[in-house]
């Protein structure tokens, strides 16, 4: 700020305060703490420190030290007049010296800038007489004359500060990380336990400049140190974690009670040297004001750590407004975050729900519930909370808004291009956040653009090599490309680094199946036993059995998976287990069993995936009214969903037309699916539209065209790792070759199918048909 005479009056107030009390008005262990005191804190009451002084002198000093220059003395002559008046009143005994304590209320004003050579000198007309007045008053009130020497020292220091401009070195660079230790809570109030650290995390994550060490990375490091992953991160332990991870800075926090008030202290230190990089101390008049005070402290400390003022102003939402004003809600949310960070997604749900009960407008808590439910396959619950979070998006920080908006477009409206654009904006705004490229990898997987998915997942992994999700996404992108060696290496690296979540192990299970390594498959099944994700592996066993033509065994595994998922309150996952198996039965010619399983699925849940797979199963099982009913519900639910309207719904319509004998109409429906074929869908890579088109061409007698479609599925091995698509594509190819007049090629395709189905159930209708067709070719 441009300085003027009022700046020098503040400096004189500092000198007068020390002359009157014998102590500094603003002190601390570092320049950062002192600056904070100058900007934001009031000095102790003059009379409380020295009860022999008159009330009027305290008023004069306080007015000289006023933060807001508009409320400070406007000229040295005004200050001089008040001092003269006090001298006169004191000498004539018209002013009583009383002992009193009182602190004026804080004012919000400008930062007092150092005086400069161009500033108006203090008391330029007659500074000597004013100094004599002040010294006389102080001597008269029993303050030692040695303060005069102290005054000279202070004035010399002020002169040095005045003419030597202060240029603090930037504490952190854009490549540095900062680790957050656990807060020290000395208030005895458990509501602050974990809550303030969560608030601090949310505030620091708003910054595009700062990079906060993830909880996953901290837990992994504690594991390498032989310590419990959930051990309290004290300052000493945090510094050791920092040094092991090569992290430059650590932030500690403390909250203490001061009567009915609270004091929050934040410190950022260099992990290597222990040097204080930044510090803030803020006060709150009540418990309800603690979050707001903490937010103000974080905003100031961001500046001390090197973030620009423009960035802070743009990305700084008050935590009590943008997140929640409820300490209890934030505490519940922080407990949910802790569970989620440990990979215990079902255990996180009650805490997020409690946070929303306490604050129904807690937008990011709704968003987190949407993510957790989505990852657990509970699409209806996920959609409800994502919609609510989107409605509340104007109440959140910029980072939270991007998070909420991207998930809304991708998972609620299904506008995948809007989702992609939001993630690109997120990348541009927070270039060191691994989440945008990580989720872009998911979008490219949905689009079947696996090369781009690999590139995005690699970028996410480079930004955050200590999180399981980039490994999962990169591994499955390789797997979908049919690059099994690369996928296996990524999954194994994740496990070696103890980042072995359920999907990592499921990926290794699939690769074990491809390689015929039953020991490897069993190892992963043993890992999953007893875990909430065991149902995923049972469903995987069902898919593996279906691939080998063991339909009865596959159905048994599907029922086991559904039973386990229901026990874990995952109704939609249980319904999906049965609906997927219903589709397999329908494609193999077991229409009655398919209809039974599909009805069982929809009795449990009419979520997105159960509706889709049941609709297809009904279509292939000649239950057209049921198929149309499920189709209509999906269409009504997803009016704007890009992939649903281009691929999934046309595939169901095509299947209905096929079984009505209208193959030409089926092909017309499937034309819109071509740009999205091969991408991931409701339950892994989507192969249904390609398979349906192949069947349609067979019905039309276009063997060569049918062979092209079925060969797509066979050649892209990653798309048909498990499930009925792999063997049925071989059967379709055999029939297409025979229809095209290439008996030799047809025999080879049939032989490939029989080799795959060497242990298949003998009563599968399509297998019996295949054997009869093969015999005719001999």
Image (spheres, rainbow, N blue to C red):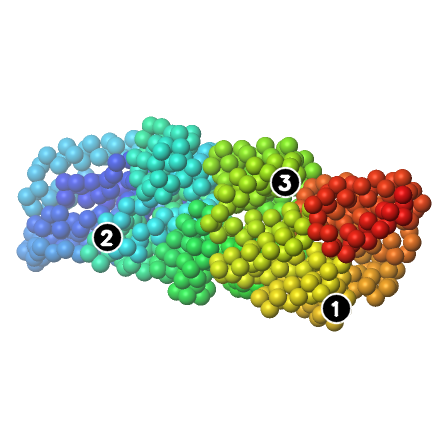
Q: Earlier in the sequence, mark 3 or mark 1?
A: 3
Instruction: Read off the residue under disc 1.
Output: 623
Residue 238 picture location, percent across and down: 34, 36
Residue at 42%, 60% (x, y): give it. Answer: 350
Instruction: Read off the residue under disc 2.
Output: 187
Residue 606 picture location, percent across and down: 61, 66
Q: Is residue 176 left or right of residue 375?
A: left
Alpha-carbon span between mark 1 and mark 2: 67 Å
Disc number lying in front (1 or 2): 1
Q: Can residue 355 be seen from the camera position used here? A: yes
Q: Give the residue furthest to the right.
A: 741
Disc number for residue 297: none
Q: Is residue 423 left or right of residue 617?
A: left
Residues packed near mark 1 inside 10 Å, few (<14), some (14 to 19) or many (20 plus): some
Residue 649 picture location, percent across and down: 73, 61
Q: Looking at the image, do the residues carrying marks 1 and 2 touch, with CB atoms under 8 Å apart?
A: no
Instruction: Read off the residue under disc 3.
Output: 513
Q: Is residue 437 left or right of residue 186?
A: right
Q: Is residue 417 left or right of residue 371?
A: right
Q: Can residue 78 be seen from the camera position used here? A: no
Residue at 46%, 64% (x, y): give it. Answer: 361
């Amino acid at each position: 700020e441009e300085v003027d005479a009022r700046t020098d009056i503040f400096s004189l107030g500092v000198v007068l305060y020390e002359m009157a009390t014998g102590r500094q008005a603003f002190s601390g262990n570092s320049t950062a703490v002192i600056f904070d005191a100058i900007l934001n804190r009031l000095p102790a009451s003059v009379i409380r420190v020295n009860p022999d002084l008159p009330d009027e002198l305290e008023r004069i000093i306080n007015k000289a030290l006023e933060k807001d220059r508009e409320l400070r003395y406007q000229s040295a002559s005004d200050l001089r007049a008040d001092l003269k008046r006090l001298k006169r009143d004191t000498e004539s005994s018209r002013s009583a010296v009383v002992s009193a304590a009182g602190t004026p209320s804080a004012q919000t004003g400008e930062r007092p800038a150092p005086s400069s050579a161009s500033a108006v000198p203090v008391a330029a007309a007659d500074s000597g007489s004013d100094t004599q007045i002040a010294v006389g008053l102080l001597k008269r009130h029993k303050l030692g004359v040695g303060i005069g020497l102290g005054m000279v020292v202070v004035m010399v220091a002020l002169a040095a500060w005045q003419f030597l401009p202060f240029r603090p070195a930037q504490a952190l660079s854009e490549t540095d990380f900062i680790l957050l230790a656990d807060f020290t809570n000395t208030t005895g109030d458990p509501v602050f336990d974990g809550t303030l650290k969560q608030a601090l995390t949310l505030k620091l994550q708003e910054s595009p400049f700062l990079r906060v060490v993830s909880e996953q990375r901290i837990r992994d490091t504690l594991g390498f140190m032989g310590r419990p992953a959930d051990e309290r991160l004290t300052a000493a332990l945090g510094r050791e974690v920092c040094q092991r991870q090569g992290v430059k800075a650590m932030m500690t926090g403390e909250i203490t009670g001061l009567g009915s008030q609270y004091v929050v202290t934040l410190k950022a230190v260099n992990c290597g040297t222990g040097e204080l990089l930044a510090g803030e101390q803020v006060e709150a008049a009540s418990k309800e004001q603690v979050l707001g005070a903490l937010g103000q402290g974080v905003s100031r400390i961001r500046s001390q750590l090197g973030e620009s003022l423009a960035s802070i102003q743009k990305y700084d939402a008050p935590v009590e407004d943008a997140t929640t004003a409820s300490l209890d809600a934030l505490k519940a949310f922080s407990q949910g975050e802790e569970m989620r960070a440990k990979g215990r997604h079902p255990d996180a749900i009650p805490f997020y729900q409690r946070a929303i009960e306490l604050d129904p407008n807690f937008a990011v808590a709704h968003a987190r519930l949407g993510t957790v439910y989505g990852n657990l396959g509970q699409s209806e619950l996920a959609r409800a909370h994502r919609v609510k979070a989107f409605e509340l998006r104007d109440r959140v920080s910029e980072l939270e808004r991007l998070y909420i908006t991207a998930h809304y477009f991708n998972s609620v409206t299904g506008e995948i291009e809007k989702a992609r654009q939001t993630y690109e904006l997120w990348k541009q705004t927070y270039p060191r956040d691994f989440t945008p490229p990580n989720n872009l990898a998911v979008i490219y997987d949905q689009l079947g653009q696996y090369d781009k998915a690999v590139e995005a997942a690699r970028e996410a992994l480079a930004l955050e090599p200590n999180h399981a999700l980039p490994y999962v996404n990169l591994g499955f992108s390789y797997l979908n490309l049919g690059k099994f060696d690369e996928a296996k290496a990524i999954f194994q690296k994740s496990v070696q680094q103890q980042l072995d979540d359920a999907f990592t192990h499921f990926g290794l299970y699939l690769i074990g199946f491809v390689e015929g390594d039953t020991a490897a498959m069993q190892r992963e099944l043993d890992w999953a036993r007893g875990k909430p994700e065991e149902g995923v592996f049972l469903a995987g066993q069902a898919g593996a059995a279906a691939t080998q033509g063991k339909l009865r065994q596959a159905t048994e595994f599907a029922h086991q998976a559904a039973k386990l998922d229901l026990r874990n309150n995952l109704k939609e996952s249980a319904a999906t287990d049965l609906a997927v198996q219903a589709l397999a039965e329908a494609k193999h010619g077991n229409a009655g069993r398919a209809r039974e399983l599909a009805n069982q699925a929809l009795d449990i849940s009419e979520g997105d995936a159960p509706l889709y797979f049941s609709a297809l199963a009904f279509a292939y099982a000649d239950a057209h009214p049921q198929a149309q009913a499920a189709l209509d519900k999906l269409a009504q639910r997803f009016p704007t969903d890009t992939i649903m309207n281009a691929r999934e719904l046309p595939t169901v319509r095509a299947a209905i037309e096929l079984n009505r004998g209208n193959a030409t109409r089926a092909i017309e429906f499937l034309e819109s699916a071509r740009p999205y074929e091969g991408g991931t869908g409701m339950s892994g890579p989507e192969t249904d539209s390609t398979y349906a088109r192949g069947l349609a061409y067979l019905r039309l007698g276009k063997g060569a065209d049918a062979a092209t479609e079925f060969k797509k599925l066979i050649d892209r091995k990653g798309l048909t790792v498990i499930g009925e698509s792999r063997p049925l594509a071989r059967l379709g190819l055999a029939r297409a070759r025979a229809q095209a007049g290439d008996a030799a090629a047809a025999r080879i395709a049939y032989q490939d199918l029989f080799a795959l189905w060497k242990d298949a159930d003998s009563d599968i209708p399509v297998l019996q048909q295949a054997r009869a067709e093969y015999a005719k070719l001999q």
